[in-house]
Amino acid sequence: MNPGGCPGRQSGSNLAQVRARILPFEARVADDYLDPRLTERRNPRSSTIDIASALEIVDLIGAEDATVPAAVAKARAEIARAIDLIEAAFRAGGRLLYVGAGTSGRLGVLDAAECPPTFGTPPEMVVGIIAGGLPALIRSIEGAEDDVNAGIAEMDGRRVGANDVVVGIAASGTTPYVRAAVSRAQTLGARTALVSCSPPPRLLEQTCDVCITVLVGPEIVTGSTRMKAGTATKLVLNTLTTGAMIRLGKIYGNLMVDLRAWNDKLVDRSQRIVMETTGLPREAARAVLEGADGSVKTAIVMARRGVSREEAERLLTEHAGRLRVVVGDPPPVSA
């Protein structure tokens, strides 16, 4: 201070400190702090969630989650196109390969793992690939999502080709590992799709066969895409595999007739499906299932058509596994 208490000439750093004290907060924020990705933006509806009660937090998260199905529905045409691509790949003997990092990768692995018990598919038909490999399923692997070489290597190592469909899953649409894998898959001749919750880069939009963009908006906790984006992704993946499997004839009416009975619950379900569709009592249903080597679909044909296992399998093969064509309509749903 100068004599008399008047401020003297300030250094540059001191001036910056003075300006910081007197300028409004908004005027001091750098103009490049906003991330262009929708999933990284702040949600104005949750800006005071840190002082909310437990019930208020539950209500706020529930209200945000309730917007997700409508956002998914807006991408219905793109989801349907992806189902058509996946069905065509399966019919050509190809595969569906999901590729993702973090939550996106885990959701892809989860959906792939559910297909064999639900639809009786071989494990290699739907494959989930996560950046960082299997350890990344239970813990975060630092830097894995940025490893473009690993994404490329996965496509090469799995011999991706023209009969396959590779679906990249990236909430932000920009994950380097996913982008590299999808780009390599395209080079190898595969059909490709991208599932994201933010508009993808222009290059991916132009080169992917389908872009499924579900705009759920900013998360309750900024950037925590395990929340709305994760929920949206799960809904989309559920629809992709279920839709393709239905198109392949693995569902009869709405019954799971190609399931693998790997536990007591599924053994019971298999018996109940045969009972409902044939009118047989449980013991007879159990016996015909044993004669069909556990195949629900084959057992239904054997019982409904009165044929041997071999003839039932021949009929199913002749009609591409479509049970309705072989035995007629399923029973109506009872109240």
Image (tube, grey):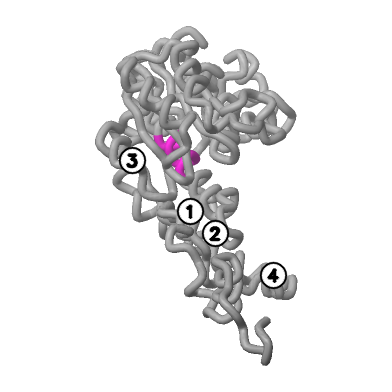
Mark sitting earlier along the chain (4/3): 4
Residue 285 position within the rendered picture, expressed as x and y whole percent measured from the top left: 63, 26
Q: Residue furthest front?
A: 3
Going 33% across and 20% down the picture, which residue do you hit? 190
Q: Hey, which quadrant is residue 182 in on the image?
A: top left
Indicate the secondary structure of the residue bearing disc 2: loop
Mark sitting earlier along the chain (3/2): 3
Q: CA distance from mark 4 to mark 3?
A: 35 Å
Indicate the secondary structure of the residue bearing disc 4: helix
Going 34% across and 42% down the picture, which residue do you hit? 201
Marking on residue 50: 4
Marking on residue 211: 3
What kind of residue is marked 3?
Answer: Cys
Q: Hey, which quadrant is residue 156 in on the image?
A: top left
Q: CA distance from mark 2 to mark 1?
A: 7 Å
Choose mark 4 or mark 3, whichever is in front: 4
Residue under pointer 2: 219
Given contact means CB atoms under 8 Å apart, are the residues at marks 1 and 4 in contact? no
What kind of residue is marked 1?
Answer: Thr
What kind of residue is marked 2?
Answer: Glu
Given contact means CB atoms under 8 Å apart, are the residues at marks 2 and 1 in contact? yes
**Label 4 neighbour load within 10 Å: few <14, some 14-19, many 20+:** few
Indicate the secondary structure of the residue bearing disc 3: strand
Residue under pointer 1: 39
